[in-house]
Amino acid sequence: MRSTAAGLAILTLLLSLPGCRIVRDTRGSPLLADAEQRIVAGRSTMDDILREFGAPDRILREAPGDLFIYRFAKVHTDALLIEEPVITNLEIFSYTESDAREDRLVVLFDRAGRVTNFGVLRGTPELD
């Protein structure tokens, strides 16, 4: 009788062990490390930007000129789940933490297709 109770206790313990999940997701292409040095306001053209960085993730058509937006995002998610998956499928405890960071390059052009201004935001190194 004791061995049966002990066996059931061990089986219950093994079935309710926590499940951990770690997810690392990226979206888009990483920005070039020297993006700021590759663009010269007043001299770089739309063709230069397309050649250096490829197709943008988004293009906005504005009255003064076009706007190219390049984005690269990283999402890190950690999860812990403790459940009894066999008999009751009861979730005992669940915890999820997620952190998302983004790099962004925005390039503004005049009507002739010449860069008038640009900006770079780098947030993904904080997740490394």
Image (cartoon, helix red, strand yellow):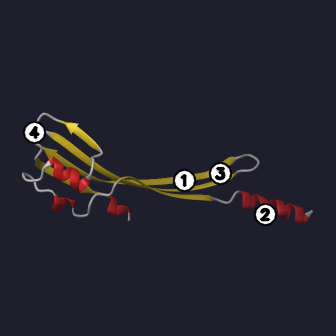
Q: Amino acid at mark 4?
A: Arg
Mark 1 secondary-structure assignment: strand
Give the Cα distance between marks 2 and 4.
73 Å
Quarter of the picture containing the N terminus is bottom right
Q: Quadrant of residue 57?
A: top left
Give the mark nearer the N terminus: 2 vs 4: 2
What amino acid is at disc 3? Ile
CA gap between label 3 and label 1 equals: 11 Å
Query: CB atoms at circles 3 and 1 under 8 Å apart?
Result: no
Position of 14 with respect to 24 (left or right) is: right
Circles 2 and 3: CB atoms closer than 8 Å: no
Using the image, determine if residue 110 lies above or below residue 118: above
Rounded to the nearest whole Å, what is the CA distance between mark 2 and mark 1? 24 Å
Return the disc, 1 or 4, that comes first in the chain's sequence.
Answer: 1
Q: Which residue is mark 4?
A: 111
Provide the residue designation for mark 3. Answer: 92
Which structural element holds mark 3? strand
Question: How many callouts does the rendering have?
Answer: 4
Nearer to us: label 2 or label 4: 4
Going 9% across and 53% down the picture, which residue do you hit?
A: 41
Disc 4 crowd rating (10 Å Cα; few below 14, some 14-19, many 20+) is: few
Give how far across and how far down residue 52 sits, in percent: 22, 56
**In the depicted view, which residue is nearer to us: 122 or 59?**
59
Which of the two residues, 99 or 3, is positioned nearer the viewer here?
A: 99
Quadrant location of the C terminus in the rendered image: bottom left
Residue under pointer 2: 10
